[in-house]
Amino acid sequence: MIAAARLAVERGASMVVAGGGDGTINAVASVLVDTGIAFGVLPLGTLNHFAKDLNIPLDLDAAIANLADGVAARVDVGEVNGRVFLNNSSLGLYPDIVRDREQQQRRLGRGKWPAFIWAVLAALRRYPFLQVGLALNGERHARSTPFVFIGNNEYRMQGLNIGERVRLDGGALSLYVAQRPGRLGLVRLAFHALLGRLAQLKDFDVLTAAKLDVETRHKRLRVATDGEVTIMATPLRYRIRPAALTVLVPGPPHFPAAADGELPCAP
């Protein structure tokens, strides 16, 4: 898939289209970063976060029509140690859950969602903490936490729209890290998120930066990027790459963000 995308770039394609979930979309997009080639997205996965945040239709026929009728929008991508991510990257609980889920699918033949539920329960039973040093905006922070979450642009962290992004051209990474919550503390965080009070908690950090470094005593660490887990050498160096990817999105009036001026589009 990546080789096919590279070949298309070498041959001077004006558009490259990928169909699949967020992991597939990420893989092809990583080849198109900084090329200026239009990227068409056919959201065929389970969650399709990137497509949803850009208002790309989830209906296949409508998504195909968008390839012909859409407009080109320049959006940011995140990067960690040279690896691109479109949505987010995380450390701690989530990479462990993904690893366990994949092992159960492969070894026990469980379906994706049953394997995911068992993996979550196993992770909560272990509930490991990461000791991390965070360097951003000229400051350093030491945290003991079960997870670190870094988003490409800012995520909504409260209410029914939690996990969505208003824009993907803000030019900043968003950092979310809880300070040593217990298992019940995670439930409390979820409760405050639904009430819209998450950012007000003293033991929950919400920060933004164009770049940040994550240091830990571990020489290598599991890192999730758009749902795919890899092992990376530390320190982890994150940065935002503004307007690095050109994506075909529905034009006005089907793309409210463009109409509101929140995501600039060019023909």
Image: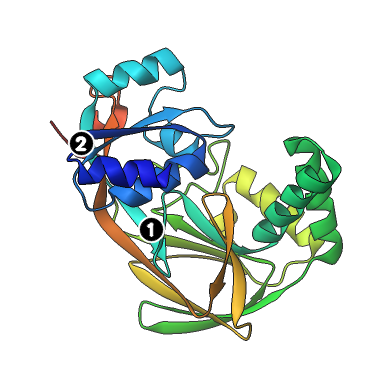
Split into 4 quadrants, where in the image is the N terminus? Answer: top left
> For the residue marked with disc 1, what is the amino acid?
Gly
Split into 4 quadrants, where in the image is the C terminus? Answer: top left
**Left or right, residue 56 beside residue 223:** left
Name above or below for residue 233 compared with residue 267: below
- Residue 81 at x, y = what percent? 43, 70
Q: How is the rendered protein coloured? A: rainbow
Q: Which mark is residue 78?
A: 1
**Earlier along the polypeptide chain: callout 2 or callout 1?**
2
Eye-nearest disc, 2 or 1: 2
> For the residue marked with disc 2, what is the amino acid?
Ala
Q: Name the image quarter holding residue 172.
A: bottom left
Considering every residue shown, the one lying at the far left of the view is 267
- Of helix, strand and loop, which one carries label 1? strand
Name the residue that disc number 2 marks.
13
- Of helix, strand and loop, which one carries label 2? loop
| Residue 167 seen in render | no
Q: Which mark is residue 199?
A: none
**Left or right, residue 49 beside residue 229:** left
